[in-house]
Amino acid sequence: KDAGADSDTVGNAIYVVAASDGRLIWKAVGTNGAAMPAEDDQLHFVKAMTHSIPSSLAVVDSDGNGIQDRAYVGDSGGNVWRIQLTEYADRQADNGSANWKVSRIARLGGSGDADRRFFHAPDIVRSRDSLGDYHGLLLVSVNRAGPRDTSARNFAYLLKDREHASTGLAGAGSTLALDHAELADITAAAGLSAIDYLGDVPWEDHGAAKDW
């Protein structure tokens, strides 16, 4: 991505290819500045995928059955995407749109001091809280192409994705994308130790950070 937060017309795509011969299996693409492409079993058009994706994807077995069925990736516009990969036993023959699903789960970028970009694949941890199990996505925004840029305010993020493969593709595609302003900001608590957390800090005044 060049300087600035404008949309990209190249690099804004995700490909799945056969490892044996490089044959295209499926791809999700954003706009390339031309007319919207016709969708088929191997091509899915994602209108909101307007920023290039510079990193590899993080792939995970979301339901613990030994088969990798989901991937996550961030893009250079501060968006985070989930790609649902239907397992072979559950696939619908010659129906690519039913077998693959792309969802934007977070919109964390913008322009000016919100020009946040993700250049590395997220780390994934499985955990649970009072609301149940989730996949925790750990990402850090940074402008690797402009390391001296101080105009953007970057963050380390933990996103909790509570959609699991067992909910099916309909559920996996229905998540509303989180905005940066919706997330609890614990920056002020970053210097506190575990002893502080269990001790005399007035957490009743900082409920969002405590809950996180």
Image (tube, grey):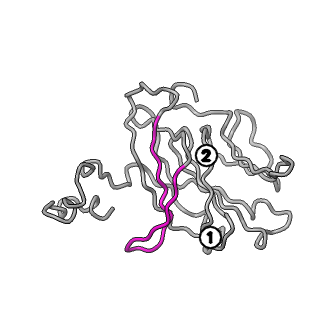
| Secondary structure of the residue carrying numbered label 2 | loop
Between residues 183 and 143, which one lies in front from this camera angle?
Answer: 143
Give left or right: position of 112 versus 9. Answer: left
Magenta range: 122-142
Between residues 46 and 80, which one lies in front from this camera angle?
Answer: 80
Q: CA distance from mark 2 to mark 1?
A: 23 Å
The mark closer to the camera, 2 or 1, is 1
Would you say the magenta stretch is mainly helix, strand or loop? strand
Q: Is residue 30 above or below residue 145?
A: below
Q: Amino acid at mark 1?
A: Ala
Rendering coords of residue 151 (x, y %): 38, 28
Q: Residues within 10 Å of mark 2 (few under 14, many from 20)?
A: few
Query: For mark 2, what is the residue?
Result: 48
Q: Tell me the tag on residue 165.
A: 1
Residue at the spot 37% in from the left edge and 36% down from the top edge: 153
Give left or right: position of 158 versus 122. Answer: left
Residue 94 within the segment the image draws in magenta: no
Between residues 183 and 132, which one lies in front from this camera angle?
Answer: 132
Q: Amino acid at mark 2?
A: Ala
Task: Name the quadrant containing residue 51.
Answer: top right
- Assign the N terminus to one quadrant of the image: top right
Which callout, 2 or 1, points at the residue further toward the start of the chain? 2
